[in-house]
């Protein structure tokens, strides 16, 4: 509780602290009303990150029917009913590759393909590439992070912010993963977002290509150069976005870079000819979305990106939904 009474020391962990403390109150002390009040306090805490707030809301909903009437009245508010958008869910089937590790904790299911065994992500990637997408990668958030890095290279590396570069061996400013990254560059970030949303995709692509040509190969945590092998490849990807979408993506990364690095869906697929773009979270047998993944999916759907959750199941297994395709 002492950690929750202050807001200076590692505030990004506040959601975890609320969560762990309420688990102790529920499972060990059996004090459900006290846990509910603490959960409500965490939900209202502006320093708690969205993925943690969603987890606290889910936990509060699960115990709401076991609370006393006075406490239940206190929590019947809009804050506790917060939910996220539900994405389209599809299933594809594949032949499960039996191994000695099957069924063990932490085991990643392997499925048969023509060129050998592969994980569920590679099986799903093959399926979507055969379904009309000419380009696709299994890179989770690295590709979108790279777009942020290219669009904001000047903000990250060229802003005159004191003491963020202390050594020539640094690959990023010291405050990149801190709240001060946004606060100390707020004007520049807002101007960048306004520029991106106000100009054409061709202009944004030209700016990214200029950075790609000048900085390609520079060691940096914000751009994965191997995912962007050529100017044509990068340009084809960028032209599948709308200016408003790029502006929202930049805002999300610049506002809290540390929080958004995890939870991004597995696959990014696009077709430069049709301008189609799809982001897919792939789930194997007995796998489900985490709160971080749900927050990212909700954000992507909010900005108009086509998002799917693809469940890969073994041939012969019971169907989970009415949408089913064979691989």
Image (tube, grey):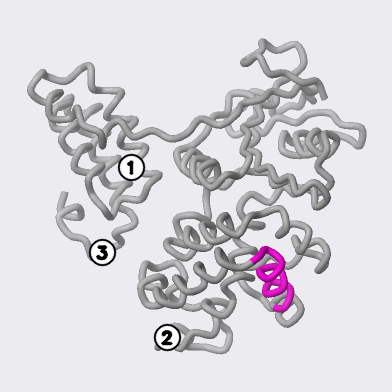
Q: Earlier in the sequence, mark 1 or mark 3?
A: 3
**Residue tagged 3:** 9
Q: Is residue 69 magenta?
A: no
* Residue 48 x, y percent position in the rendering: 30, 50
* Residue 227 x, y percent position in the rendering: 75, 60
Residue sitting nearer the eye, 239 or 261: 239
CA gap, disc 1 to disc 2?
A: 32 Å
Residue drawn at 65 percent across, 67 percent down: 223
Q: Secondary structure at mark 3?
A: loop
CA gap, disc 3 to disc 2?
A: 23 Å
**Residue tagged 2:** 161
Task: Name the dominant secondary structure of the magenta segment.
Answer: helix
Dot 1 alpha-carbon crowd within 10 angstroms: few under 14, some 14 to 19, many 20 or more:
many
Looking at the rendering, which quadrant does residue 95 occupy? top right
For the record, the magenta segment spans 200-210
Tag 1 near tag 3, CB within 8 Å: no
Q: Secondary structure at mark 1?
A: helix
- Image vertical order of residue 80 relative to residue 45, above or below: above
Residue drawn at 84 percent across, 28 percent down: 112
Identify the disc placed on residue 18. Answer: none
Residue sitting nearer the eye, 140 or 81: 81
Left or right: 258 with respect to 320? Answer: left
Q: Earlier in the sequence, mark 1 or mark 2?
A: 1
* Residue 77 x, y percent position in the rendering: 21, 31
Q: Earlier in the sequence, mark 3 or mark 2?
A: 3
**Residue tagged 1:** 53
Residue placed farthest to the right in the image?
114
Q: Nearer the viewer, mark 3 or mark 2?
A: 2
Residue drawn at 59 percent across, 65 percent down: 148
Left or right: 71 with respect to 271? Answer: left
CA gap, disc 1 to disc 3?
A: 19 Å
């Amino acid at each position: 509780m002492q950690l929750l009474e202050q807001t200076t020391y590692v505030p990004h962990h506040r959601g975890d602290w609320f969560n762990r403390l309420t688990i102790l109150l529920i499972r060990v002390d059996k004090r459900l009303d006290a846990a509910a009040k603490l959960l409500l306090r965490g939900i209202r805490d502006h320093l708690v990150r969205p993925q943690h707030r969603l987890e606290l809301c889910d936990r509060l909903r699960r115990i709401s029917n076991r609370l006393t009437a006075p406490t239940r009245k206190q929590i019947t508010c809009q804050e506790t009913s917060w939910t996220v958008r539900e994405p389209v869910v599809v299933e594809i089937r594949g032949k499960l590759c039996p191994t000695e590790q099957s069924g063990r904790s932490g085991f990643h299911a392997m499925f048969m393909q023509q060129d050998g065994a592969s994980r569920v992500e590679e099986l799903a990637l093959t399926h979507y590439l055969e379904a009309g997408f000419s380009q696709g990668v299994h890179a989770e958030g690295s590709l979108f992070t790279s777009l942020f890095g290219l669009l904001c290279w000047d903000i990250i590396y060229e802003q005159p912010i004191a003491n963020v570069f202390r050594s020539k061996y640094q690959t990023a400013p010291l405050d990149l993963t801190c709240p001060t990254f946004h606060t100390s560059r707020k004007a520049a970030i807002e101007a960048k977002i306004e520029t991106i949303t106000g100009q054409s995709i061709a202009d944004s692509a030209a700016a990214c290509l200029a950075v790609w040509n000048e900085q390609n190969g520079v060691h940096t945590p914000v751009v994965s150069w191997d995912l962007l092998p050529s100017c044509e490849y990068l340009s084809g990807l960028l032209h599948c976005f709308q200016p408003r979408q790029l502006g929202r993506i930049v805002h999300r990364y610049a506002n809290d870079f540390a929080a958004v690095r995890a939870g991004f869906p597995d696959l990014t697929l696009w077709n430069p000819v049709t301008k189609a773009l799809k982001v897919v979270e792939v789930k194997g047998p007995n796998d489900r979305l985490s709160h971080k993944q749900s927050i990212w999916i909700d954000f992507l759907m909010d900005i108009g990106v086509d998002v799917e959750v693809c469940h890969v199941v073994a041939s012969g297994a019971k169907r989970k939904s009415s949408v089913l395709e064979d691989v």
